[in-house]
Amino acid sequence: LATALAAGAATLPHPLPPPAAWHLLFATGALPMILAAMAYFVPVLTRTGPPPAALRVVPALAAVAGAAIVAHFAGALPAARAWAPWLALAVPAGFLAWMARRWRACLGHPNPCFRWYATALAFLALGLAAVAASALAPAWAAPLRRFHMHANLLGFMGLTALGTLQVLLPTVTHRPDSDAAPRLRRHLPPAVAGVAAIALGAAFWPPLAVAG
């Protein structure tokens, strides 16, 4: 909420540059919130114990990286462009390593939403890697930035939201949904293919994005 209100300052007489406002909203606000929610839901999906206290560092690390890139776009921390994406890459890497341990500790198979979370984090890692690579290859900066935007918004945020809602809504409505798990299994491959096609198409070949 705080970052959403701050991002709204872009409409004031001394606005933030649009990239700074968007990163304030998503990288500093939404990303740590989603990671914190994942930290709660992954033990539920795998029927394992609560997350370790050390995992609390990961959303905080994401917030620091997000704040650094906001400062970069606002002109206050130019050097952050070189290191903030690499710092942010530690976030999905650490989360995926923890999730792999929970997968091994799970009794039976985890809820299919677990795969949606893992795939979403993989898209986050790819999007961050693209923007990190764009600093090393300036000629490719524009397409890599477009891939970064779509992989993060549709791949990370979109897949996380769709997976979570299908698990959470039966609890909210107090009605079981026996088709939720089969549906999550069925829908993940086309969802991943669609997001990948949109991100790659937006970056390099628009007709592929239309197909996605």
Image (cartoon, rainbow, N blue to C red):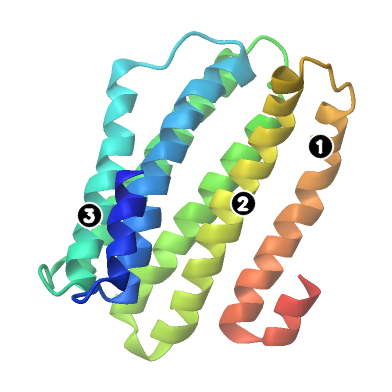
Determine if residue 83 is in view: no
Q: Secondary structure at mark 3?
A: helix
Mark 3 lies on residue: 67
Mark 2 lies on residue: 158
Q: Position of residue 188 (x, y in %)?
A: 76, 46
Q: Please name the amino acid that badge 3 sits on.
A: Ala
Mark toward the start of the polypeptide (1 vs 3): 3
Give the spatial CA distance, label 3 vs label 2.
Answer: 22 Å
The residue located at (47%, 62%) in the rendering is 127
Mark toward the start of the polypeptide (2 vs 1): 2
Q: Position of residue 35 (x, y in %)?
A: 43, 36
191 relative to 20, above or below: above
| Quadrant where the C terminus is found in the figure | bottom right
Give the spatial CA distance, label 2 vs label 1.
Answer: 16 Å
Q: Please name the amino acid that badge 1 sits on.
A: Arg
Q: Secondary structure at mark 1?
A: helix
Q: Secondary structure at mark 2?
A: helix
Q: Position of residue 84 (x, y in %)?
A: 24, 59
Q: Please name the amino acid that badge 2 sits on.
A: Gly
Query: Seen in the image, is 112 located left or right of residue 143?
Result: right
Mark 2 and mark 1 residues within 8 Å of each other at the beta carbon: no
Query: Seen in the image, is 101 located left or right of residue 57?
Result: right
Determine if residue 22 is in view: yes
Mark 1 lies on residue: 185
Q: Position of residue 106 (x, y in %)?
A: 61, 14
The residue located at (41%, 46%) in the rendering is 31
The residue located at (79%, 36%) in the rendering is 184
